[in-house]
Image (tube, rainbow, N blue to C red):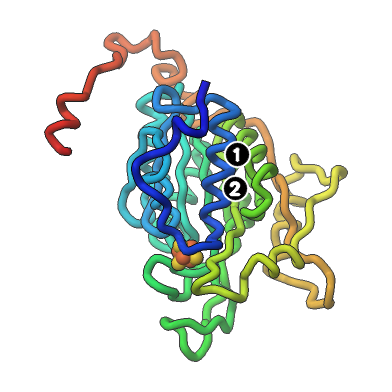
Amino acid sequence: MTQLADLATKCSPNWCPGCGDFAIWAAFKNAAVAKGWDNTNTFLTAGIGCHGHLLSFTKITSFEGLHGRPVPVATGAKIANRNLNVFAFTGDGDSLAEGTNHLIHACRRNHDITIILHDNAIYGLTTGQTSPRSPHGFKSKSTPSGNLDNPINPVTLAIASGATFVAREYAAHIPKLSDLIIKANDHHGISIIDVLQSCITFNPGYAHEFYQNNTYYLGKDFDKTNKKQAFEKSLEWAMPTGRQGEKQIPLGIFYEVNEPSYEAQIPQIKDQSLISNPPTAKDITGLLKKYT
Ligand code: SF4
């Protein structure tokens, strides 16, 4: 049974006070405690960005890769050991700029992994440059006269690319986000959660108040198996009504269908007993000591 204390490392979080990363981290740890995720059954990876520090503060086997590359690392881990719960933490700069191709191809292959996208609409780690999620006209150090590009909508992109579980949540809704992370991991196929998070230091326009005032949950009658409806609903962010007081950013599960995952279609991965020399657990303490 995993306890919160079991997940603690010697590193203390170095995020700015009030950063949405704290909430995503808390939601993930609560989910890990609820489901018993630990070093023996779970693997985490992350790309480069403030989100990536999460690996240093969470005592679960992990690998922080190159910028934009958490998704291929996650797919490799899942193929190597199909029994692992595999989570790829990434940022909007990470997987919607440098790593967009990896994200799209992982979606169409329906790899059995969970992607948690820290969506703060800015490059925070490098002190505030316009990202692929920043709105048109956004002013920053990299676009002082205003962003000429239109933002990518990760929910729309994931649905269009073939993902079979696509959701959006707001980071500060910690219990709901924990539940969503569990559902995403339970899903057999690729799961993407677009987590709206505030970068309170460099993107004050998307502060907590903005999300509290502009988000709402998809209703119980929303048919999350209807791809066309999910796609159209996902566009609401991109085409706000502009009417004052109207909440325009939907949260919840947009799309969820059961289709064979990539791993389930390969007999040797689906059934490890078919492998003539299946991998066995090895004590790597000696190896680790060489590098510490
Ligand atoms: Fe969070 Fe932004 Fe600070 Fe990074 S720079 S830790 S994203 S508030």
Residue beneath the point at 40% across and 27% down:
39
Q: Please name whichever residue, 161 or 146, is drawn nearer the observer in this view of the structure.
A: 146
Amino acid type at mark 1: Ile
Residue beneath the point at 65% across and 65% down:
208
- Residue 142 to residue 28: above or below: below
- Disc number placed over residue 81 in the picture, else none: none
Amino acid type at mark 2: Ile
Mark 2 residue element: strand
x and y percent of residue 57 in the render? 40, 44
Q: Please name whichever residue, 171 or 158, is drawn nearer the observer in this view of the structure.
A: 171
- Is 23 left or right of 81, judged from the image as shown? right
Q: Pointer 2: what residue?
A: 193
Question: Label 2, label 1: how many angstroms apart (C-alpha)?
Answer: 8 Å
N-term-proximal mark, 2 vs 1: 1
- Is 169 left or right of 47, judged from the image as shown? right
Q: Quadrant of the C terminus?
A: top left
| Quarter-of-image position of residue 163 | top right
Q: Which-is-in-front pick, marks 2 and 1?
A: 1
Q: Pointer 1: what residue?
A: 181
Please say if the residues under marks 2 and 1 sit with CB atoms less than 8 Å apart.
yes
Q: Please name whichever residue, 124 or 15, is drawn nearer the observer in this view of the structure.
A: 15
Number of marks drawn: 2
Q: Please name whichever residue, 69 or 61, is drawn nearer the observer in this view of the structure.
A: 61
- Is 237 left or right of 70, judged from the image as shown? right
Could you classify mark 2 by the number of other residues whose Cα lies within 10 Å: few (under 14), some (14-19), or many (20 or more)? Answer: many
x and y percent of residue 272 in the render? 40, 13
Mark 1 residue element: helix
Residue beneath the point at 23% across and 19% down:
283
